[in-house]
Amino acid sequence: MGKIVVEKRGRIVIPAEIRRALGIREGSELIVELSNGRIVLTPVRKLTARDLFGIAGEEEVSLEEVENALSDEA
C-alpha cells in the first residue's frame, strides 16, 4: 500500500506497480464507489468474444442470468 496526494480537481495518481498488477492503462475505465467510509476503485473488465463463447450453451439463458454471471466474476 502507498500514500497518494489529491491534486487539483480531485485528481489522483495510482502507483505504477498497482496499475501494472491490475492491467490499468491510459483510457482504462474504473468504477468508483464509497464503501464503509472508503473509496473503492474497481477496473471495468472488457469482455472479449472468447469470454462470451459458450456462455449460453444449449439452454436458454436470460439477460439477467448473464449479467449475474458476469458480476460474480468481477
Image (cartoon, rainbow, N blue to C red):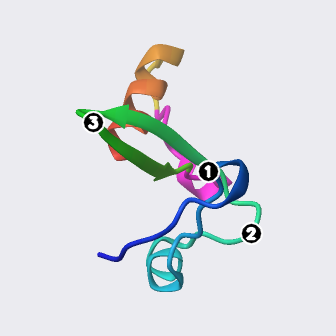
Residue 38 lies in quadrant? top left
Of circles 3 and 1, the one toward us is 3
Q: Are marks 3 and 1 in contact (CB under 8 Å)?
A: no
**Gap between marks 1 and 2 measured at Cα:** 18 Å
Q: What amino acid does circle 3 point to? A: Gly
> Residue 27: x percent and y percent?
76, 61
The residue shown at (38%, 73%) is 3
Q: What amino acid does circle 2 point to? A: Glu
Among the two numbered marks 1 and 2 on one chain, the one whose residue lies closer to the N terminus: 2
Dot label at residue 26: 2
Relative to residue 68, is residue 8 drawn left or right?
Answer: right
Q: What amino acid does circle 1 point to? A: Leu
Q: Secondary structure at mark 3?
A: loop
* Residue on which the image places disc 3: 37
Q: Is residue 53 visible?
A: no
Residue 70 lies in quadrant? top left
> Residue 69: x percent and y percent?
38, 33
Task: Tell me the crowding category of disc 3: few under 14, some 14 to 19, or many 20 or more residues within 10 angstroms, Cα based.
Answer: few
With respect to residue 5, does 43 lie above or below?
Answer: above
61 within the magenta span: no
Dot label at residue 47: 1
Q: Secondary structure at mark 1?
A: loop
The residue shown at (63%, 52%) is 46
**Gap between marks 3 and 1 measured at Cα:** 30 Å
Q: Is residue 15 visible?
A: yes
Q: Nearer the viewer, residue 42 or 67?
A: 42
Q: Which residues are magenta?
A: 45-57
